[in-house]
Image: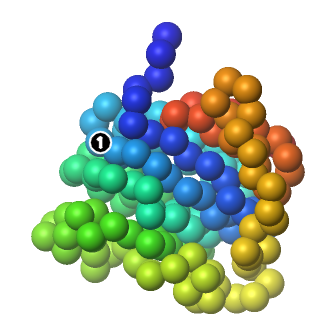
Amino acid sequence: MPLPDGLEMTALSSGDDCVVLQISGELDHFTEQPFRASVGTFLGRGHRHAVLDCSALTFCDSRGLNCLLSVEWLLERRQGRLLLARVRPNVARVLQLTGTGALLRTFPTVERALATLPPEQRPAWPPPAGRHRLPGGHTESPVSGAPATRRGSSVEAG
């Protein structure tokens, strides 16, 4: 069964307390469930903080906002945070118009987002070089060398 086009998530860096993920494509009704499954895979490892690099997130509707808010809610319960970095103007406008921007913290760079966390809770940044495309469309995780996620699937990087 083909996965919905328009969503891809890649782990850029990870530590015990925090994961940095890059999200690409569209976050909407069609990609809501794959997004939740992918994020759930990463957060299931116990991370308290997540930084989403949104530089390649081209579209986000109300269903996408609900996804982001649910991640924020979960991380708050863990005494953590969801931090959005490099948000594109069209997505920033949706955050502003809906009032969601007051609930979700946004930063111009991943570095600035990570700087708000205690140093011992930050993953290595910038990430190690050498992220490569693997057969089947998987992206190699620079942290472990294992496949990360592909088009919303919940393949674990191990």
Please give the name of the residue rendered at 80% of the width and 62% of the height, measured from the top-left corner: 129
Vertical order, 133 against 15 (above or below): above
Amino acid type, label 1: Asp
Please say if 6 is above or below 70: above
Q: Could you tell whether 96 is left or right of 106 in the image?
A: left
Label 1 CA crowd tier, 10 Å (few <14, some 14–19, many 20+): many
Residue 43: x and y in percent read 64, 53
Color style of the picture? rainbow
Q: Nearer the viewer, residue 95 or 128?
A: 128
Residue 157 placement, left or right of 114: right
Quadrant in which the C terminus appears: top right
* Residue 147 makes an appearance in the image: yes
Residue at (80% x, 55% y) in the render: 130
Q: Nearer the viewer, residue 64 or 103?
A: 64
Residue 69 position in % (x across, y down): 37, 60
Q: Relative to the observer, which residue lies in front, 150 or 154?
A: 150
Q: On the image, which quarter does residue 96 sit in? A: bottom left
Which percent across, then down, holds residue 89? 27, 70
- What residue sits 55% from the left and 86% below the top? 112
Residue marked by disc 1: 28
Q: Secondary structure at mark 1?
A: loop
| Among the 4 quarters of the image, the one containing residue 54 | bottom left
Outermost residue, top side: 1
- From this viewpoint, which residue is outermost toward the left? 97
Q: Please state the total of marks drawn on the protein image.
A: 1
Can residue 154 be seen in the rendering of this structure?
no
Image coords of residue 107 (percent x, y): 45, 81
